[in-house]
Amino acid sequence: MTNFNKIKSVVVALLIPAVGFCQDEAVKVTTSYFTNVLFLTLLVLIIVLAIVIVAFSGVFKNIAESDYLQNKYSSKYEDTNSSSIKNTVTIMLLLLSVSLMAQDVTVSKVTDDGRIGGIDQFTFYFLVSLVFIELLVLGLMFYQFNFLVKTHLTTVKQVKAKKVESKLLLSLTDAVAVEEEESILLDHDYDGIKELDNNLPPWWKYGFYITIVTSVIYLFHFHVFKTGDLQGKEYDNAIVQAKIEVDEFMKTSANNVDENTVKVLIEASDIATGKELFMANCVACHGKGGEGTVGPNLTDDYWIHGASIQDLFKTLKYGWVEKGMKAWKDDLSPMQIAQVASFIKTLKGTNPLNPKLPQGDLYTEGGMAPISDSILIKKDSVKVIK
């Protein structure tokens, strides 16, 4: 860090001839420049900047010589900064030599009309040049200072992070450092392999303790106090819950049913709804008890278009327009059609008053009866058509 001392000596060397030179010029041109406000202002500014440079270089040196930078970044800093400082000092010396060489020529040509603020041009520009050079040095030092501070902070963070990491690793493993392993070395020696008396890792020990506590809680919860369900009971509960969820789903998605997926509804609420719809829409053709009027009897075992739940749903949904049966798909929802079809299934064998004679084919729950004759119903007799 000798570069900072070089900067100090150069600044002081510059100030001494500058002040003496300005005093000589003041004797030649006027009684004294120390009564000139502009001269005093520039001189004070030069001195203040010189003091700031000296103070700044001291701080600079302390940071650069810190333990962190000396151990990790000192060589890098020396390489990156020495050339910049040497260049700055060289510029200052060149400007000073040019100014001194021009002194004799300039003084002889200065007149009262060429003064700047009461100061001859050479003295004015010389002082301004010193101010500029000092500002340039300060700028360079500030740039390098900023670099050192960032490097210092980064190094401090890295060192702290390593310390935290080592503490965390030690707390998890409870291992002894490699350089201290002799303190836990046992007398056991197997073909040159030596045994260390390391402790079990804390995470393993505490994990084992937790399993012991958990097993005791499990025993009392499931087998002693019986406050929890075992696996078999949990399975049964899951089945019950699944059925509830399926029923709930069917209620909300019942309108997705069609002639291929329809099932006989057995809930009393569905049958009651189907009866209401039947009374409101079907009694004109089939009678209040399903005995049949214009339409066929719905209480016997003979059906024209089948009596399965799928057949009934299809008949209600699409109708048989050519035979006078209306299609109800635009008036009733799929769920309502299924409810009406399920209610019609309950009419079988009810024997209402004045039932209409059978029409169609004999139907059994297993399918249509295999008969070869069709039955044509007359008012009071049955005629078999070959």
Image: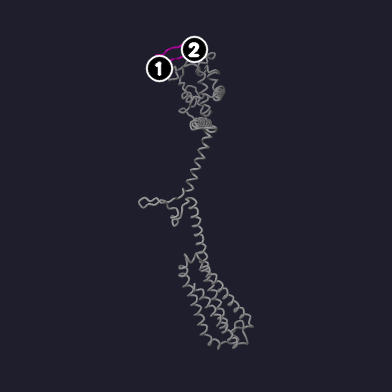
The residue that mark 1 highlights is 370
Q: Single out the mark in the foreground, 2 or 1.
A: 1
**Quick check: 69 above or below 342?**
below
Q: Position of residue 329 (x, y in %)?
A: 51, 28
Of residues 48 and 125, the one drawn nearer to the viewer in this rendering = 48
Residue stretch rendered in magenta on the structure? 374-386
What secondary structure characterizes most of the magenta part?
strand
Please check the rendered image and state whether residue 385 is part of the magenta-colored stretch, yes or no: yes
Please check the rendered image and state whether residue 190 is part of the magenta-colored stretch, yes or no: no
Of residues 139 and 253, the one drawn nearer to the viewer in this rendering = 139
For badge 2, the amino acid type reads: Lys
Q: Is residue 62 visible?
A: yes
Of the 4 image quadrants, the one containing the C terminus is top left
Task: Give residue 379's mark.
Answer: 2
**Quick check: 256 above or below 20?**
above
Q: Position of residue 171 (x, y in %)?
A: 50, 51
Describe the element under mark 2 as helix, strand or loop. Answer: loop
Which residue is located at x 51 percent, y 55 percent?
Answer: 164
